Amino acid sequence: MENSLEVREDVEAGSESGCKYILLIGGVLSGLGKGTIASSIGRLFRSHNFSVTAIKIDPYLNIDAGTMSPFEHGEVFVLNDGTEVDLDLGNYERFLDVQLNRDNNITTGKIYDIVIKKERKGLYLGKTVQVVPHICNEIQDWILRVSRQRLPEMEADPEICLIELGGTVGDIESMPFIEAMRQFQFRVGRSNLCVIHVSLVPVIGTAGEQKTKPTQQSVQQLRALGLSPDIILCRSTKPMNAEARLKISNFCHVSYESVLGLHDVSNLYRIPQLLYDQRIFTLLHRYLNIPMRKAVDFDQWIELADTVDRLSGRSDLVVRVAMVGKYTELEDAYISVCRALKHACYWLKLRVEVDYVEASELESAESASYERYWGLVRGADAIIVPGGFGDRGIEGKVLAARYARESNKPYLGICLGMQVSVIEYARSVLGWEDANSEEFAQNIEHPVIVFMPEISKVQMGGTMRLGKRRTYFRNKRSLIYSLYRRCFGGELDWVDERHRHRYEVNLKFTEALSRGGMDFVGQDETGERQEMVEIPGHKFYVGVQYHPEFLSRPNRPSPLFYGLMMAASNRLGEVWGEAKE
Ligand code: GLN
């Protein structure tokens, strides 16, 4: 019985490793902000000098989020190792200020993939392979493995492992995970696992009555599956009253003090404080039997929340950004770009307002929203063309890039946005009217953007040029270099940023483009793949093949977003002054 031997070993290892597990499971409905709540709890521990790690479980069959449309799931976030994940992992990275890897995200697809591969190798020794125990064991093994991996930013092995189960109790998809966690409480010992149920308390009627029935029912569902919540966090539009708390406590088998209200707050950086003020930290310490530690940087976090509030009322500090993209109906599609803009603005004490511009609507005066969208582009203080795939709206993006270049308006092109700026330059400045990307046009004379030789044309998942890669500066008198130097401090030869693309600037045309005035500021280690472009003499016209938004942090904005916001508020002179010193 290979399995039971493994289990016995892990019971000891689990309780001895010293790691404590906090499991968050949602109820009633999705979209309650479980990810932000889990990250906020992680922030509390991190701010009190605990070593933290996090696992997001996505109970879908996809191996990863790489093949999913942003229309369905919002942005695809990319980790250092190139794993394409749900945007929640971005929240974890920003809140915890860590860099995660593929193991920090579990999907049903990944678990089944392991089990099926093992079965094909005959590793189950003739047994019938089943959800219980094989799938459930694999889930638990994965969690145990991650909880022993120290993240690079931490000084010790994980002391706290946050586990967020995506979806809602009762979903068919999440059943194996709930069963795995039911078993896991015995595997690591009940005192090493705290179960937090995140639910909703709707407020209805003119009297604003807080209704607890949905929470009672979702807790019942959870308990029927063998997991009993230790803490219940109730999302609500307004602070929870004592009556509702008492009711939930009585009906859901938790103490009164373990029912906490999470009402709407002015900004998301308030959530750690809101949790702290309701003594969740004390509760968790007690449940998990861990000694208290002094706060190290929690004040800075509160200060950040205060800054955001202060700025929100200041219409005189507004910087308007036109985001010219394709998924403009869905704000989540560009969430990291928006966060990166905000981070830069907190730093510069500005307030950013993003106007989403549907690129395809800019293409023809016949379009219903042509005037309105061009009005937003013209009225903007800065223009961003973010990453994207497929040809819809591409000509509109080219027009927006042209407008930015010709009118000296700050422009940041990210990935596809950089490719668009090269296409635009080739057409308008070099006069190559047919210039385009091979992604959108074939058999043309000037394919200025081409398919990368190493990329597969058949396999779609995980086959792009992905993850953290190095870019070497060729031109250290460039604006891009000055910005990185200012933000990172000191001389730099290279920077690491995260990538996600299949196409690149065509080496055949870079010389002509350079002669025409486009400055290719940085390349990959071969010196041939273009990563950074700018146009000298323009106020701020920058394109990068990578996604600078993924490594931006509230306390450490990305240099390029910082530069864009400085240019938009006419403060870039400071950076140039510094570069000349
Ligand atoms: N579609 C382009 C490529 O594959 C750009 C990708 C992106 O913007 N992430 O290269």
Image (spheres, rainbow, N blue to C red):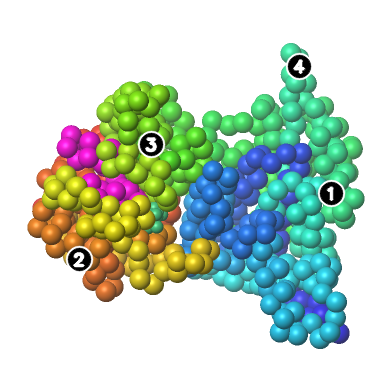
Q: Cα distance, mark 3 to mark 1?
A: 46 Å
Tell me the quadrant of ligand 1.
Answer: bottom left
Whether 303 is drawn above or below 513: the answer is above
Assess disc 2: are there few (<14), some (14-19) or many (≥20) residues with their C-alpha within 10 Å of its C-alpha. few
Residue 362 on the magenta segment: no
Image spot of residue 432 (x, y percent): 17, 50
Disc 3: which residue: 360
Q: Amino acid at mark 2?
A: Lys
Q: Are marks 4 and 1 in contact (CB under 8 Å)?
A: no
* Sooner in the amino-acid sequence: mark 3 or mark 1: 1
* Sooner in the amino-acid sequence: mark 1 or mark 2: 1
Q: Are marks 2 and 3 in contact (CB under 8 Å)?
A: no
Disc 2: which residue: 508
The residue drawn where x is 81% and y is 34% is 214
Residue 332 as seen in the image, left or right of residue 482: right
Residue 80 is tagged as none
Assess disc 3: are there few (<14), some (14-19) or many (≥20) residues with their C-alpha within 10 Å of its C-alpha. many
Q: Can the viewer see residue 555?
A: no
Say which of 417 and 489 sits in front.
417
